[in-house]
Amino acid sequence: MTHDLLLALTGFAFVSSVTPGPNNLMLMASGANFGFGRTIPHMLGVGLGFTFMVFVVGIGLMQVFEMVPGSQAVLRVVSVAYLLYLAWKIANAAPPEAGGATGRPMTFLQAALFQWANPKAWAMALTAITLYAPSRDLGAVLVVAAVFGAINLPSVGCWTLMGRAIRRWLTSHGRLRIFNRTMAVLLVASLWPMLGQAA
């Protein structure tokens, strides 16, 4: 990979990783609800899970989509349905001290698996391989995955820190409820660009 192409890939990885999307909005909500420390497994799941996803897409999964007509449309429907479910869970999350099923942050495995249901993650992975590893040889795919791995984790960490920073203003259950419902609406709204690509 040439120096110029590597710089372009780095810029693409940064912009696509740091801009709002399902991962970042959920991490901000988790940082606000549970703090930075308890959100670390979620951040690692996003960073490492997406890096692995880029690698798998690059070494063969992309070819499956090309060979099976309609597979991307099915994936899009399943992803949107799952994201709507997650938005509902965020909107109805109980305060952490209330305990219960809604009072826990996402685990490492849950966050890693979520990448496969995240429309933005699919768009990023498919675009990155198409533009920066068109030959799909192992070396090029590894470079693309490594660049995303190096950039994605600090990027998502910033969103968790933003969530933690506003935590002190969410001391009342009423404000926390409004915040969670706002994040849920934004999560649903983040689907619009991906849905627009299907039109």
Image: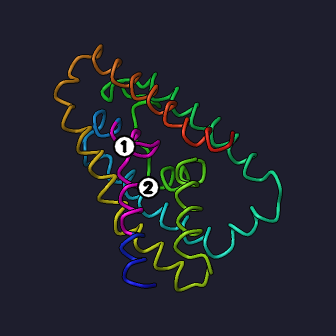
Q: Which residue, as the protein is rendered here, is positioned at the far front?
A: 4
Please state which amino acid type lies under the numbered disc 1.
Leu
| Magenta stretch, residue numbers | 10-28
Please state which amino acid type lies under the numbered disc 2.
Val
Circle 1 residue: 27
Residue under the point 35% across and 60% down: 14
Q: Name the residue nearer the viewer: 151 or 104.
A: 151
Q: Is residue 161 above or below residue 124?
A: above
Circle 2 residue: 46
Position in image of residue 114 (x %, y %): 54, 49
Label 1 environment density (alpha carbons within 10 Å; few <14, some 14–19, many ≥20): many
Q: Name the residue nearer the viewer: 110 or 8.
A: 8
Position in image of residue 18 (x %, y %): 35, 51
Q: Is residue 193 above or below residue 11?
A: above
Q: Quadrant of the C terminus?
A: top right
Return the disc, 2 or 1, that comes first in the chain's sequence: 1
Label 2 environment density (alpha carbons within 10 Å; few <14, some 14–19, many ≥20): many
Q: Is residue 124 above or below residue 139?
A: above
Residue under the point 58% across and 31% down: 85
Spatial CA distance of label 2 from label 1 is 9 Å
Mark 1: secondary structure: helix
Q: Name the residue nearer the viewer: 127 or 161.
A: 127
Is residue 75 a member of the stretch shown in magenta? no
